[in-house]
Image (cartoon, grey):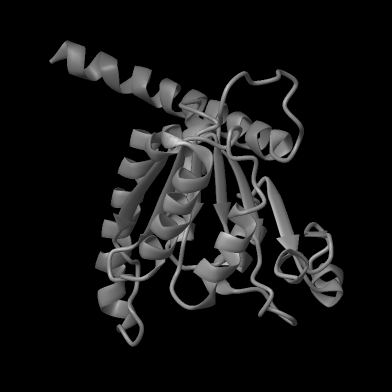
């Protein structure tokens, strides 16, 4: 009985300390995000590439083609469980690298699926449960992969993955540099995923492809129309 009574004041003292430490760590992560690493990394960087239905995958694959394959390896492609086309496009691309670059490339690409937070037309009430399931699944994937770099460009599946990676950074369980490239189709306003990542300061680098978006969201980086440049 006395042990239980004595433990209560200790817990009351420990909780504010824990909250304070997590708050300090949170601000440190936000401050450090986007700054260049002071220590050069030898070898490849585990890379998580988020694909999405529609034009998201086409744009992301255009970006992937510009990456240094020996530096961004292994590559983990992730798409929604109901997306049957995106991973096929990534597999075709990786197979073309095998044919042109040698057999070692076959072990550098992995293809995974994740639960979708909300299907098109799904009610917001039922999406609460599916969003929770998707977040837990995303956390499990991030812990399993421990990506050092994340590339995403707006599909809804990227948000729980980025939040999970950010949460692990706050806990000191790994560091993922998150690069968000807003879709070129977004001319006047950000996508919902982009807006959330921007407002919450989760992305290390946030790119937009239209000057009017840069004016509206000044913390974003504007480097021209990246997709148009790559597809010429």
Q: Quadrant of the C terminus?
A: bottom right
As drawn, is 85 to the left or to the right of 70?
left
Q: Position of residue 206 (x, y in %)?
A: 71, 56
Residue at the far left in the pictured view? 1
Residue drawn at (60%, 58%), measured in percent from left and top?
197
- Pick the residue in front: 127 or 106: 106
Compared with 46, 13 (above or below) is: above
- Pick the residue in front: 208 or 25: 208
- The mark tally for this picture is 0
Compared with 1, 187 (above or below) is: below
Residue drawn at (71%, 18%), measured in percent from left and top?
39
Q: Position of residue 144 (x, y in %)?
A: 33, 35
Residue at the far bottom in the pictured view? 121
Q: Position of residue 65 (x, y in %)?
A: 61, 54
The quarter holding residue 1 reads top left
- Pick the residue in front: 110 or 169: 110
Q: Visible in this render: residue 196?
A: no
The quarter holding residue 11 reads top left
As drawn, is 183 to the left or to the right of 159?
right
Q: Visible in this render: residue 4?
A: yes
Residue drawn at (39%, 26%), measured in percent from left and top?
12
Residue drawn at (73%, 59%), measured in percent from left and top?
207
Compared with 130, 71 (above or below) is: above
As drawn, is 118 to the left or to the right of 185?
left
Q: Position of residue 224 (x, y in %)?
A: 84, 66
The quarter holding residue 114 reads bottom left
């Amino acid at each position: 009985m006395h042990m239980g009574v004595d433990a209560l004041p200790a817990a009351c003292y420990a909780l504010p300390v824990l909250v304070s430490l997590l708050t300090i760590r949170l601000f440190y992560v936000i401050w450090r995000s986007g700054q260049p690493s002071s220590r050069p990394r030898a070898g490849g960087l585990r890379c998580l590439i988020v694909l999405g239905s529609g034009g998201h995958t086409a744009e992301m694959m255009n970006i992937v083609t510009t990456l240094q394959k020996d530096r961004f390896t292994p590559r983990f492609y992730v798409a929604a469980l109901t997306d049957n086309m995106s991973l096929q496009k990534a597999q075709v691309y990786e197979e073309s690298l095998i044919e042109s670059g040698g057999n070692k490339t076959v072990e550098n690409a992995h293809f995974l699926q994740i639960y979708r937070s909300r299907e098109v037309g799904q009610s917001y009430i039922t999406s609460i449960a599916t969003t929770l399931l998707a977040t837990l699944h995303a956390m499990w994937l991030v812990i399993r992969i421990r990506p050092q770099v994340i590339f995403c460009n707006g599909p809804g599946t990227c948000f729980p993955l980025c939040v999970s990676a950010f949460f692990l950074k706050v806990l000191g369980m790994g560091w993922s540099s998150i690069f968000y490239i807003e879709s070129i189709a977004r001319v006047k306003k950000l996508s919902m995923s982009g807006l959330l990542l921007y407002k919450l300061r989760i992305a290390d680098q946030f790119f937009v492809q239209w000057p009017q978006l840069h004016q509206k969201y000044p913390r974003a980086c504007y480097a021209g129309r990246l997709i148009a440049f790559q597809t010429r």
